[in-house]
Image (cartoon, rainbow, N blue to C red):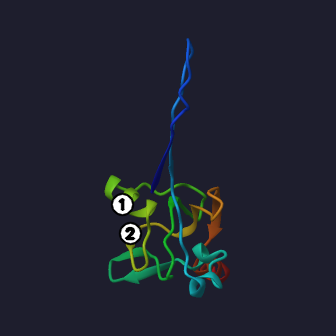
Amino acid sequence: MLNLQDIPPSFKGNGVAVAVRNQVKLIYRPHALEKGRKGAESDLTVRYLPGEQELVNTTPYIFAIGEVKDIHGKAIKFTKKQQKKLLMFMPDDKVNVTGYKVKSVIALNDEGNPKEYILKSADTSSNKH
């Protein structure tokens, strides 16, 4: 995060001076990671373990995930700790999704807009049924 503050010029007499403070999130992506970035959210995978399953970030990218949807389009409920992790979903991070068939995630794209990404693993599993 980068904090910026605009300090207004001084003036004589009556008037109102307004100072503006902004906080900007800067994202730096090394050139080596640029090539496969577009739509990489679709590469998140669901790992099946005995008795449980988890959504795993198997990519080299960090995602800001606001929502995870099941195959019926309903948002999966997470604990506050899991929600916080999803907001900065780092490589190799995982969250428990036992009991759900994950279809998609809604994540912020590079322009800062929320976008739905269908998981590639969801596409292949839905074709089998």
Foreground pick, 111 / 97: 111
- Indicate the amino acid at tag 2: Val
**Disc marking residue 72:** none
Q: Residue 125 is drawn in which quadrant? A: bottom right
Relative depth, front residue between 41 and 73: 41
Seen in the picture, residue 42 relative to 22 is either above or below; the reply is below
Residue drawn 55% across the image and 81% down it: 30
**Disc 2 on helix, strand or loop?**
strand
| Residue 52 screen position, x and y as percent | 35, 75
Q: Quadrant of the N terminus?
A: bottom left
Q: Between marks 1 and 2, how big is the CA–CA gap?
A: 6 Å
Q: Residue 82: which disc?
A: 1
Determine whether the residue tagged by mark 1 lies in a helix, strand or loop.
Answer: helix
Q: Is residue 80 left or right of residue 28?
A: left
Foreground residue among 51 and 62? 62
Question: Measured along the vertical axis of the image, is residue 63 above or below residue 23?
Answer: below
Where does the image place residue 77, in percent across and percent down from the top left? 43, 54
Looking at the picture, tell me which residue is in the foreground, 111 or 91.
111
* Residue in view at x 41 percent, y 68 percent: 97
Query: Cβ–Cβ below 8 Å for labels 1 and 2?
Result: yes
Give the amino acid at mark 1.
Gln
Furthest-front residue in view? 12
Residue at 38% over, 69% down? 95
Judge whether residue 119 can be spotted in this image: no
Q: Provide residue 100's location: percent of width, then percent of height.
A: 47, 66
Q: Residues within 10 Å of mark 2 (few under 14, many from 20)?
A: some
Which label number is shown at residue 95?
Answer: 2
Q: Residue at x 51, y 68 (%)?
A: 63
The residue most toward the top is 14
Residue 105 is situated, as x and y percent measured from the top left of the image, at 56, 64
